[in-house]
Amino acid sequence: MKKSTQVACIVLLVLLIDQVLKIWVKTSFFYGEEIHLIGDWARLHFLENEGMAYGARLHDLPIIGKFISPAAAKPMLTFFRIFAVGFIIYLIQKMIKNGTKLGAIRCMGLILAGAVGNIIDSVFYGKIFSESPRYTNQVATLFPEGGGYSNWFYGHVVDMFYFPIINTTLPEWLPLKGGEQFEFFRPVFNVAEASISIGIFIILLFYRSIFQDEQTVQPVEPTS
């Protein structure tokens, strides 16, 4: 199978899983509802965010947030993601042409799939879903009669994976944070964000091995 075909299969598979799960959660869970999968530390917990990965928002960032209004931040972030997707596709094509190892190309495919997955939410979800109002037991519907909850490029990203593996109170003797509640891992995320994180993690972990050029072994001439 060609490298480009393998990348396409990875992207399509991740997008299929990501979007099916998001649509199911969005139309089956009310905002904040959760299901315990394994004890208290592995849950499906429905949240939505308006910004970046793991619930972060562009206009809340230091320095940048001072110059960007919440209304402008959302489409700016989406257009940045679209630009990033185009750049990733260019990199993948270049890597395939240069004969880069398949492992690295697959990792880039995971990153590409994750980026596209959240772009779909941002661009389309505001138009095709009704709102998931907070503090109610009302679930959203797909393609509502009265139209969606927002305009194009203003959709919310659906998150659902929540792994509070550690939830404890820090000892009083710790400086600054002593006595405060500590939770790890706090952010709620989705398949697309997990795909990006896994791709980047593997590249960083095995950078040398997956990007190392194959060296040609030169025969050693016997000395007389």
Image (tube, rainbow, N blue to C red):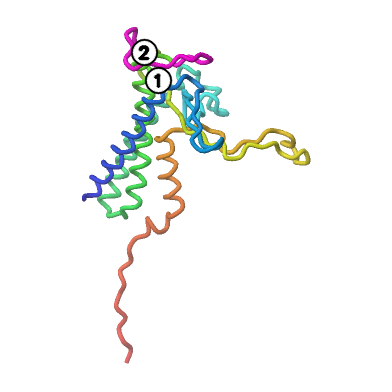
Three-letter amino acid code at disc 1?
A: Gly
In the rendered image, which quarter is residue 128 located in? top left
In the image, residue 175 sits, relative to residue 218, either above or below, namely above
**Kind of residue at badge 2:** Gly
Cα distance in 3D space between marks 1 and 2: 9 Å
Residue 208 as seen in the image, left or right of residue 224? right
- On screen, 22 above or below 224? above
166, 215: nearer the viewer: 166
| Extreme residue toward the bottom, this view | 224
Q: Position of residue 172 (x, y in %)?
A: 77, 38
Q: What stretch is highlighted in magenta?
A: 132-147
Q: How many labels does the image show?
A: 2
Is residue 70 shown above or below 55?
above
| Left or right of 118, for residue 54 | right
The majority secondary structure of the magenta stretch comes to loop
Viewer-proximal residue among 56 and 191: 191
Q: Quadrant of residue 224?
A: bottom left
Mark 2: secondary structure: loop
In percent of the image, x 38 and y 17: which residue is there?
126
Categorize mark 2 by other alpha carbons within 10 Å: few (<14), some (14-19), many (20+).
many
> Which quarter of the picture shows residue 165?
top right
Q: Which residue is drawn at 51% across and 37% down?
A: 42
Q: Is 51 situated left or right of 21 in this image?
A: right
In front here: 39 or 47?
39
For disc 2, the marked residue is 148
**Residue named by callout 1:** 155
Q: In this view, does 26 lie above or below 17?
A: above
Whether the magenta-drawn stretch holds residue 139 is answered as yes
Residue at 57 percent across and 29 percent down: it is 62
- Is 180 colored magenta in this rendering? no
Mark 1 vs mark 2: which is more N-terminal? 2
Looking at the picture, how far across and down is residue 183, in whole percent? 62, 36
